[in-house]
Image (cartoon, helix red, strand yellow):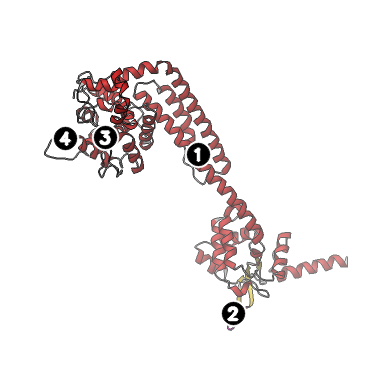
C-alpha cells in the first residue's frame, strides 16, 4: 500500500516538473535523451541535421509543413545550445509562433506533436505550459528556458543518414529506369515511323498494325513524373520492352512476306518515273555535295551531274559489257554515296514537281526574288523551316552528308506533309525525319514514289517537269 502511494506521488511530481503531460514510453525516451545530451560531434552543426531532414522528407515521416516549423525553430537556437551542458530550447510563445507561421495555435501544436512522434523534438514545460526563458548577456548561454526542446533531433542523425542512403539508391534506380523508358519510347516511335514510311512508299499496308500498336502504346505513354513510385515506373519499363519487341516482330514478319517480291519491286522502282515527264535525268538536279552555310561540311565534293540524255541514264542503270571492262572509270565517275542517292529516285524529281508537292507553309519560306526559282531557293526554304519541325542541326547535317542538300530538302518536305495530313498526322517529326535517313542508308528509301503519290492525290495526275 505504501509502495503504491509512493509511485503515485512520484508520478505526480513527474507530471508537475514536465507541465502535466501524460507520460508514455516515447516521452520517457525523449526526456532521457535531453538529460543525457553531451553535444553534437565536432564536425556536425545544427543545420547539418536540418539538411538531413529536408533531404529525406516523407521517407522519414516529415511533411513539408513539419519541416517548415522545424526550420523556423532551428533559427532560434545557437551553436552554443548544441554543446554539452546546454539544451536547444525554443522559449518563444505559442501565439507568436502561430502568428509568424500564419496558422492557428492548435495547428502549431499538431505540427509539434507530429515532430515529436517523428523523434525530432520534445518539451521542457513550465507548470502552466507558458513558454519563456532567458539568455546570459555575456556568454549567450540559456540560463533557464521552458518550451520546445530540439535535443532528440541530434539522436536521429545516424538513422536519417541510413534512410538517406536508401533513398538515394532508389532515386538512382528510378532515374535509370526513366532513361531506359525514354530509350524504348524512341525505338517504338522509330519503328512506327518506319511503318508509316513503308506505307507511304507503297511497300506494304501497315495501317492496321499501326492502329494496333498505337492502342497498346497509349496507356503507357503517360509522362514519367516523380509522383510515380519506383515499382510503377519499373512496370512501365517492362511494358515498353514488351511493346518494342512486339513492334519489331510485326515489322520483321511483314517484311519477310514481301521479300520474295523485292527483286521485282526494285526493278520497277528503278524504271519508274513521271508519266508526263521526259526520260531524261534532270540536268539541274545534281547529286553533288555543295558546300555553303546550309551545309556544315567544309570539304568540297567533286561535282558530278547526272547524264543529260536517256542513253546516259540507261548506261548508269544497266552497264554494258564495254562498261564492265572499264569499271574503274565508272567507279571514278560515281561514288558509293552517289549510287546510294540514285537508289532514292531523287534524279526523277523535277523542281516543279517538288514545288507542287510542298505545302503552303513550306512555300512561305521560299525567298522572294525577281528571277526564276532554283533548287538553292528550295534548299534555303527547307533550312529555315527545319526548326519549326523540331529537326535538329545534327539531323540536318547527317541528312546532307548522306543525301546531299537537295535530298535532305525533299525529306523535310515529306516530313512537313506527314505532319499536316488529316489521317494520323505525324507527331514526332524529328523521329520521322531520322527514320527516313536510316532507311536511306539501307537503300530502302524511294523519295520519288512519295512525291509522285502526293501529286497524284492532290492533282489526279503527276505534274510534268
Q: Which residues are magenta?
A: 137-141
- CA gap, disc 2 and disc 4: 85 Å
**Horizontal relation, residue 142 to residue 248: left or right:** right
Q: Position of residue 40 (x, y in %)?
A: 65, 69
**Horizontal relation, residue 125 to residue 98: left or right:** right
Residue 390 visible in this rendered orientation of the protein: no
- CA gap, disc 1 and disc 3: 40 Å
Closer to the camera: disc 3 or disc 4? 3
- According to the picture, the residue beneath numbered tag 2 turns out to be 140
Label placed on residue 356: none
- According to the picture, the residue beneath numbered tag 4 turns out to be 373
Q: Position of residue 71 (x, y in %)?
A: 55, 64
- Give the quarter of the image for residue 455: top left
Closer to the camera: disc 1 or disc 2? 1
Q: Residues within 10 Å of mark 3 (few under 14, many from 20)?
A: many
Residue at the outermost right position: 1
N-term mark: 3 or 2: 2
- According to the picture, the residue beneath numbered tag 3 turns out to be 288
Residue at image point 21% right, 35% down: 375
Amino acid at each position: 500500500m505504501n509502495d503504491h502511494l509512493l509511485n503515485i506521488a512520484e508520478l505526480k511530481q513527474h507530471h508537475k516538473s514536465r507541465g502535466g503531460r501524460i507520460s508514455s514510453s516515447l516521452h520517457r525516451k525523449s526526456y532521457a535523451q535531453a538529460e543525457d545530451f553531451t553535444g553534437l560531434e565536432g564536425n556536425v552543426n545544427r543545420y547539418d541535421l536540418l539538411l538531413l531532414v529536408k533531404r529525406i522528407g516523407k521517407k522519414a515521416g516529415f511533411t513539408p509543413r513539419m519541416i517548415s516549423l522545424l526550420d523556423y525553430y532551428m533559427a532560434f537556437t545557437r551553436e552554443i545550445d548544441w554543446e554539452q551542458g546546454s539544451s536547444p530550447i525554443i522559449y518563444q510563445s505559442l501565439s507568436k509562433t502561430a502568428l509568424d507561421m500564419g496558422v492557428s495555435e492548435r495547428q502549431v501544436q499538431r505540427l509539434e506533436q507530429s515532430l515529436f512522434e517523428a523523434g525530432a523534438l520534445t518539451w521542457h514545460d513550465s507548470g502552466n505550459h507558458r513558454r519563456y526563458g532567458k539568455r546570459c548577456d555575456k556568454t549567450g548561454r540559456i540560463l533557464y528556458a521552458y518550451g520546445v526542446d530540439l535535443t532528440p533531433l541530434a539522436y536521429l542523425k545516424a538513422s536519417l543518414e541510413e534512410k538517406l542512403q536508401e533513398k538515394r539508391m532508389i532515386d538512382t534506380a528510378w532515374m535509370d529506369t526513366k532513361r531506359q523508358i525514354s530509350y524504348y519510347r524512341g525505338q517504338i516511335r522509330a519503328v512506327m515511323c518506319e511503318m508509316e514510311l513503308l506505307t507511304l512508299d507503297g511497300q506494304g499496308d501497315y495501317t492496321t498494325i499501326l492502329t494496333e500498336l498505337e492502342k497498346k502504346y497509349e496507356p503507357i505513354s503517360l509522362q514519367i513524373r516523380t509522383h510515380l513510385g519506383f515499382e510503377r515506373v519499373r512496370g512501365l519499363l517492362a511494358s515498353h520492352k514488351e511493346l518494342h519487341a512486339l513492334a519489331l516482330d510485326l515489322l520483321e514478319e511483314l517484311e519477310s512476306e514481301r521479300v520474295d517480291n523485292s527483286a521485282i519491286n526494285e526493278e520497277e522502282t528503278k524504271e519508274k518515273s513521271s508519266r508526263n515527264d521526259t526520260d531524261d535525268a534532270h540536268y539541274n538536279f545534281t547529286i553533288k555535295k555543295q558546300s555553303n552555310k546550309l551545309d556544315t561540311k567544309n570539304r568540297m565534293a567533286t561535282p558530278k551531274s547526272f547524264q543529260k540524255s536517256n542513253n546516259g541514264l540507261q548506261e548508269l542503270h544497266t552497264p554494258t559489257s564495254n562498261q564492265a571492262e572499264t569499271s574503274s572509270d565508272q567507279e571514278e565517275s560515281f561514288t558509293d554515296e552517289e549510287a546510294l542517292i540514285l537508289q532514292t529516285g531523287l534524279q526523277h524529281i523535277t523542281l516543279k514537281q517538288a514545288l507542287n508537292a510542298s505545302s503552303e507553309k513550306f512555300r512561305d519560306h521560299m525567298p522572294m526574288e525577281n528571277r526564276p526559282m532554283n533548287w538553292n531557293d528550295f534548299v534555303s526554304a527547307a533550312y529555315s523551316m527545319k526548326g519549326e519541325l523540331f529537326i535538329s542541326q545534327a539531323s540536318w547535317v547527317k541528312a546532307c552528308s548522306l543525301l546531299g542538300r537537295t535530298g535532305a530538302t525533299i525529306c523535310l518536305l515529306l516530313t512537313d506533309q506527314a505532319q499536316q495530313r488529316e489521317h494520323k498526322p505525324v507527331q514526332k517529326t524529328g523521329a520521322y525525319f531520322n527514320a527516313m535517313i536510316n532507311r536511306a542508308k539501307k537503300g530502302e528509301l524511294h523519295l520519288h514514289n512519295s512525291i509522285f503519290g502526293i501529286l497524284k492525290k492532290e492533282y489526279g495526275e503527276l505534274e510534268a517537269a
